[in-house]
Amino acid sequence: MSPPRIHLRPTMLSDLDYVVSVEQDGANRPFITPWERVQHEGALRFPDSRHFIIEAGPALERAGFVIFQGCRNPHGSVELKRIVLARQGQGKGLGREALRLLKKMAFTQLHAHRFWLDVKALNVRALKLYESEGFVVEGRLRESVRITAEGADGYDSLIVMSMLDREYQARVALGEEAL
C-alpha cells in the first residue's frame, strides 16, 4: 500500500468557519443535514465525540471534516456522524482513504464492537463507497428526513449501515484493511 495522502487532526475552534462553509456548499447540502456552528462547538467539547479536519496533499491543506459520536459508548457502538469533503477534494479517492482511517481508528483506538452510520438514500455515491468498504445495510428509515431545495420539497430515507469488529478483523486478515 502507498502512504496515505490524507491526515486527520483534531478540529480547533479556529476551523469552525471552514467546517460550516463546507457543510453549506451546494455540492454537499443535499446529502447532509447541516449543523449550526454552536453544534460543532459542542461536538468539540463533548467527551463522547471526536471532530477531525481531513488534511490532504503534501501541504496538508484542509479537504473536509469528520465527526464521530459514541466514543465512550459502553456497548462499543461508535457512530460515523458525518464525513464531508470540500468540493476540491471530491472524486479523488480522499473519501475512501478517510473512511479506511476512520475504520482503523474506530476498531483499534476506540475499541468499537460496532461502527455504524446512516446515509441518505439519494446519496448513491456514498452508499456504493460504504458497501465496497464492507459496511452492511441494516435497515431503512423511510422518509425520515425532509428535503427542501430549489424547486423540491419532499422526504428522503436514511439507510443505516454498520460493520462489526469481527468483520473488520476478517477484512484485515484478507488484506483488505491496513493495520
Image (spheres, rainbow, N blue to C red):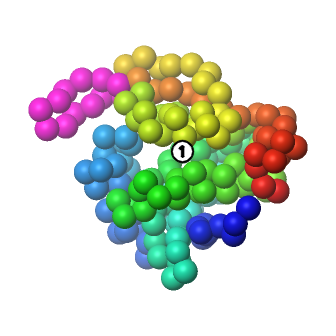
Residue at 24% from the left image edge and 23% from the top image edge: 154
Q: Mark 1 — residue? A: 81
Q: Which residues are magenta?
A: 144-156
Total count of labels = 1
Give left or right: position of 37 versus 102.
left
Nearest the viewer among 150 and 77 is 150
Q: Secondary structure at mark 1?
A: strand
Give left or right: position of 13 versus 98.
left
Q: Is residue 59 above or below residue 122?
A: below
Q: Which secondary structure dominates the residues rendered in magenta?
A: strand
Residue at 34% from the left image edge and 49% from the top image edge: 28
Residue at 67% from the left image edge and 57% from the top image edge: 101
Q: Is residue 113 above or below residue 39?
A: above
Quarter where residue 143 is shown = top left
Reply yes or no: does residue 62 show up in magenta.
no
Residue 13's spot in the image, x, y percent?
A: 46, 72
Residue 63's spot in the image, x, y percent?
A: 45, 66
Q: Is residue 155 visible?
A: yes
Residue 31's spot in the image, x, y percent?
A: 37, 40
Residue at 72% from the left image edge and 42% from the top image edge: 73
Residue reaching furthest to the bottom: 59
Split into 4 quadrants, where in the image is the N terminus? bottom right
